[in-house]
Amino acid sequence: MRGRQHTLASSIALEGVGLHTGLPIGCSLHPAPVGSGRVFVRVDRPGSPEIPARLGSLAPAHLCTLLQQGSPSVQVQTVEHLLAALYILGIDNCRIEVEGPELPILDGSALPFVEAIAQAGIQAQDQPAVLGVIQEPVTVWAGEAFVSALPHPTARFTYGIDFADCPIGEQWLSWRENRPDFVQSIAPARTFARQQDVELARERGLIQGGSLENAIVCSQTEWLGPLRYPDEPVRHKLIDLLGDLSLLGCRLQGHIVAYKAGHALHHRLAEQLLKSGSLLIHEE
């Protein structure tokens, strides 16, 4: 399957609440023509404007990945979990119709999207997939935080986080790309937050739809609900990284190492890979 482009075999719909807006939102995933890429469509707006899931659509945002197109701009946010699922399951071309300004958060992980894709089925197409091979090391920093891309014969992703003042603590995960393992051990990891950060974000008008039904939250001393994995937070950071790097529009071969990073640094690395010429893009 890896050598050719793929799309969905059929359409499927999902609905839920938006993490940041708190609005009820429906979305549906549809097969798309070869070479069209992953494209969001705001079907609730006149003319159903399209927003390609590419680096050129990025806009600044807090606590999520936001894409926009046009003037006046049309936006869609909190796209990273779906994009990670599409990327790892090899869905190169997909039309994503959204009835609102963000995707539903569902249970806070990528698993509901993985299950929806499995239910829709995967269809091979008659053109080769596009591969991006990291040729030279590239690193971007912000204080202690960094993301590096290194040459490597396979696709590997390593992530480290450090929240010394709460139960999250220091966590590291190094993962070699593997679709069955993603479904079992990465996709179910939910978004996470410290209780004090939740309060600050809500004061800024964010995470209005957040709850213990779609996130894991800790106080300074304990988790407020059960975890799916002891290191669930760092597993979820890997989902965010995969979704953000999918905006390159190609499969990746190389080793990505991130530490204390976030969406903004993920995006900066992807942009620097293109600007520096360190990413050799060709057909598989």
Image (cartoon, rainbow, N blue to C red):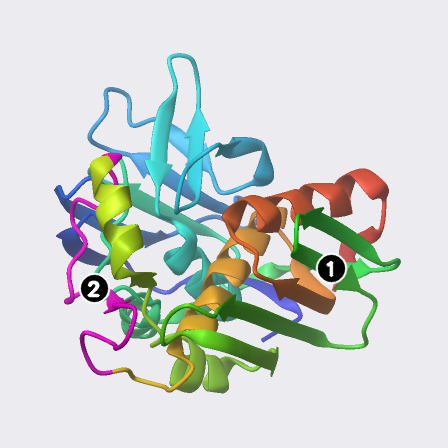
Q: Confirm whether residue 131 shows in the render.
A: no
Judge whether 54 appears above or below 114 on screen.
above
Residue at 67% x, 56% y is 146
Left or right? Give the position of 164 relative to 13.
Answer: right
Q: Which mark is residue 214?
A: 2
Which region is colored magenta? 204-226
**On the image, numbered disc 1 is attached to which residue?**
148
Task: Pick whichever of labels 1 and 2 is earlier in the sequence.
Answer: 1
Left or right? Give the position of 80 relative to 12.
Answer: right
Q: Label 1 is placed on what type of residue?
A: Ser
Q: Picture coordinates of residue 165 (x, y %)? A: 41, 68
Q: Picture coordinates of residue 234 (x, y %)? A: 47, 73
Callout 2 crowding tier (Cα within 10 Å): few <14, some 14–19, many ≥20? some
Residue at 53% x, 68% y is 161
Judge whether 68 appears above or below 151 on screen.
above
Examine the structure image and report whether residue 211 is included in the region drawn in magenta.
Answer: yes
Choose between 13 and 80: the one closer to the eye.
80
Magenta-colored segment: predominant secondary structure: loop
Left or right? Give the position of 266 relative to 70.
Answer: right
Q: Which mark is residue 175?
A: none
Residue at 43% x, 29% y is 68
